[in-house]
Image (tube, grey):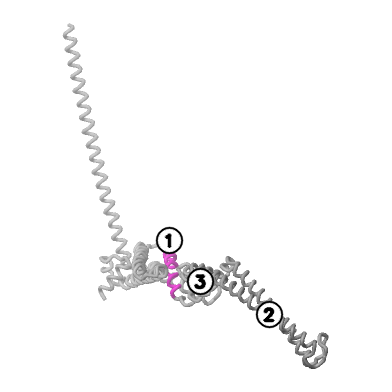
Amino acid sequence: MHGLTRFFWFCSGANFAILKRTPTESNKYVGIGATVFFTGVLAALAAGYALFTIFQSLLPAVIFGLLWGLVIFNLDRFIVSSMRKKEKAWAEWKLAIPRLVLAVLLAFVISKPLELKMFEREINRELDKQKTLFIAESKANLAKGFPEIQELENNILALKAEVDEAESFRNQVQKEYDAERFGEKTSGTSGIVGLGTNAKKKEEQLDAAQRDLDQLRTRNQARVDTLEKQIRDFMALRQAEFEKQQPGIDGFDGLAARIDAMSRLTEESAAMALANMFIILLFIAIETSPIFVKLISARGPYDELLELHEDKVKLFKGEKWTFAKGESEARVSYFQDTHFYATDLKKERTNRKNQAETEQELSKWK
């Protein structure tokens, strides 16, 4: 437990030497450190899932997830450790506002991948619907790109309609022939029972219609077979084009696609939108809780000793600066005094030398 306590102290960014002197503050900083640590763990899980969604590989996801978790852990630790309890509340809040903004931003970044994981089933169903729409659109576009298939199908329908028309004509002749044999009186029959002259004529017409129908069926079937083979060739080309697009459709499950699917689900379902909002608020609360703990907690012995230690450092710095400044001024004064004295002495010697030389020259002239 002692090792775990020291670890959470480290996570909170507290000074061990000062915190050991204030045992009543230990639990507060253990709680702050635990919150910072578990926020980093959640960030690592979120980043790992996001990277696994992108690369579909475990090793890069684990490595980047750990790296991102350490980054978030370090940022949270810095945010908490850099805050100081002041005697004026407004001064604390003024310093805390930028840290709160950063904490809220981190909460949004951490929460999004975990939201996608929580609603993975619903998102997968939405992606399947989207893929189905993409497949239908792709097939429709490919159908427009192969108008020959529709034209060939229309030709087949025309050939079959021609056969149906000939078959209808043969059936009509068959009815007239049967009516003539059985003595049924119509506008085209005599009404006499038996195979008379009219019945034989009807029989000949029926045989001719049947021959024409058989010939037409044989001829049109051969043409239909040829057209169907052409259609199969064009459909094979269309299928090949569709298979080229199929991997892109099957791979429509990346991070951006899932975020877009999540957005559509929240727009369509009020329950999903509410759950999404509560998850974001939860992560904001987790991320900002160490800062709020520091803000709302009373100024304790740890803060007093920390401020005292920092003030001692400032005083020590002031003393060193005063000593250094005094020593510097003394050295400059000494340098100026000695430098100017040597200069004056040199000038005096030069003047004396010049005066002696002048006197020697004057004595020679005399």
- The answer to whether residue 129 is left or right of residue 95 is right
Quick check: marks 1 and 2 in contact, CB under 8 Å? no
Q: Main secondary structure of the magenta part?
A: helix
Residue holding disc 2: 213
Query: Type of residue at label 3?
Result: Ala
Task: Estimate the spatial distance between the alpha carbons at disc 1 and disc 3, rounded to whole Å.
Answer: 33 Å
**How far across and how far down the image is residue 212, in percent?**
69, 79
Quarter holding the C terminus is top left
- The answer to whether residue 117 is left or right of residue 146 is left
From this view, report whether residue 164 is shown above or below residue 326.
below
Mark 2: secondary structure: helix
Query: Type of residue at label 1?
Result: Pro
Q: Given the current orientation, which residue lies at the most extreme top position?
A: 366
Q: Is residue 116 magenta?
A: yes
Camera-nearest residue between 204 and 222: 204
**How far across and how far down the image is residue 312, in percent?**
28, 57
From this view, report whether residue 54 is shown above or below residue 122.
above
* Image point (75%, 89%), residue name: 178
Residue holding disc 3: 261
How would you rate the neighbour count of disc 1 (Cα within 10 Å): few for under 14, some for 14-19, many for 20 or more? few
Query: Type of residue at label 2?
Result: Leu
Q: Is residue 64 magenta?
A: no
Task: Residue 12: give its label.
Answer: none
Camera-nearest residue between 27 and 100: 100
The residue mark sitting in front, 1 or 2, is: 2
Mark 1: secondary structure: helix
Q: Which residues are magenta?
A: 96-117
The residue mark sitting in front, 1 or 3, is: 3
Q: Quadrant of residue 171?
A: bottom right
* Image point (51%, 69%), residue name: 242
Residue holding disc 1: 98
